[in-house]
Amino acid sequence: MEIKPTWCPGCGNFGIWLSLKNALTQLNIGTDDGVVVYGVGCHGNMDDWMKMYGVAALHGRTLPVAQGLKLANRALPVIVVSGDGDCLGEGGNHFIHAAKRNPDITVLIHDNQVYGLTTGQASPTAEAGFKTKSTPEGVFDEPVNPLTLAITAGATFVARGFAGDAPGLTALIKAAVEHKGFAVIDILQPCVTFDKVHTYQWYRERIYTIETPDNKMKALEKAMEWGNKIPVGIFYKEDKPTSEDHEAVITAENPPIQELLSEFI
Ligand SMILES: Cc1ncc(C[n+]2csc(CCOP(=O)(O)OP(=O)(O)O)c2C)c(N)n1
Ligand code: SF4
Ligand SMILES: [Mg+2]
């Protein structure tokens, strides 16, 4: 059955989809070998045409589902496709506590600074002054910084990528999936319909790739840079035991994906 993407032509989600598929292919993770957990939003619509096991979670609740899957089968690559609203708004508390626990999960934040699916309201990452239909006078408060939040909460792999740079984003996703621990990639994702400011061109004029800083303080300093210059790359990486390492095993053996997902089907 052919299912066509519902994303607007030119949406940054296409670049993220492509990069995720490239990364999984290059890592030899086949359609039956892992699970993607999707939030609710334009990003989550990827579930309809990604040929891989998936769970469509409730808005803001990707991380509890992903952590449950990982705990039940530690061998399973678990990837979360979430939005800036999904992950840092309604799911914000889950994000902080998941980072603190360090489960072996990869989280892709499709960061378009808006609630795309609900037609363009300001999200937690919307820049101060940004005018949307929910903030006609401009956003008055400062945005959540996903990178500094992830680093200070305890994430052990923290990166920023750009949806308009598929090779660069593919490399970041590969590194994140290979990392053993809570890996977060904040992905700058143009929403071509509801954000006429942060366009592909706007990002291309500003982004540059960094070398990974060698300590947390320097990583935080780099992560706070935003404006005429916007750094991308891996900001922080640390090897630490995961939450699964600390938890008693629920099952003696890693059950197959079909069994794990039978409750959802
Ligand atoms: C529990 C719950 N709360 C709120 C909503 C309404 N809702 C659907 S999508 C969305 C925001 C989506 O924004 P984001 O996560 O940034 O995703 P995007 O559409 O930008 O990819 C909201 C608030 C919902 N479906 N379920
Ligand atoms: S509304 Fe924005 S985020 Fe949603 S599909 Fe269209 S361009 Fe993409
Ligand atoms: Mg969004």
Image (tube, grey):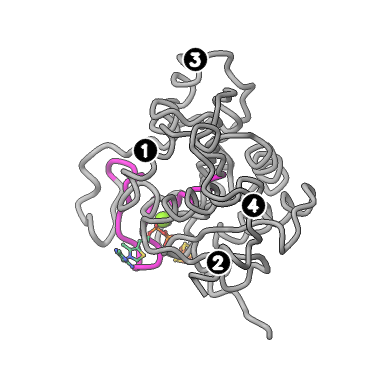
Residue on which disc 2 sits: 261
Provide residue 72's location: percent of width, then percent of height: 55, 51
Distance from Cα at disc 2 to Cα at disc 4: 13 Å
Tell me which residue sits at (55%, 44%) in the image.
Answer: 105
The answer to which of 10 and 157 lies nearer the viewer is 157
Regarding residue 79, the answer to whether it shows in the image is no
Q: Amino acid at mark 1?
A: His
Provide the secondary structure element on which disc 1 rests. Answer: helix
Distance from Cα at disc 2 to Cα at disc 3: 41 Å
Q: Amino acid at mark 2?
A: Leu
In the rendered structure, which disc, 4 or 3, sits on the residue that comes first in sequence? 3
Residue on which disc 4 sits: 254
In the rendered image, the vertical position of residue 233 relative to residue 17, given as above or below:
above
Label 2 C-beta lies within 8 Å of the nearest ligand 1 atom: no
Marking on residue 246: none
The quadrant where residue 12 appears = bottom right
Marking on residue 218: 3
Provide the secondary structure element on which disc 3 rests. Answer: helix
The quadrant where residue 30 appears = bottom right
Residue count near mark 3 (Cα–Cα under 10 Å), binned few <14, some 14–19, many ≥20: some
Provide the secondary structure element on which disc 4 rests. Answer: loop
User: Which stretch is magenta?
Assistant: 106-129
Q: Quadrant of ligand 3?
A: bottom left
Q: Residue furthest front?
A: 252
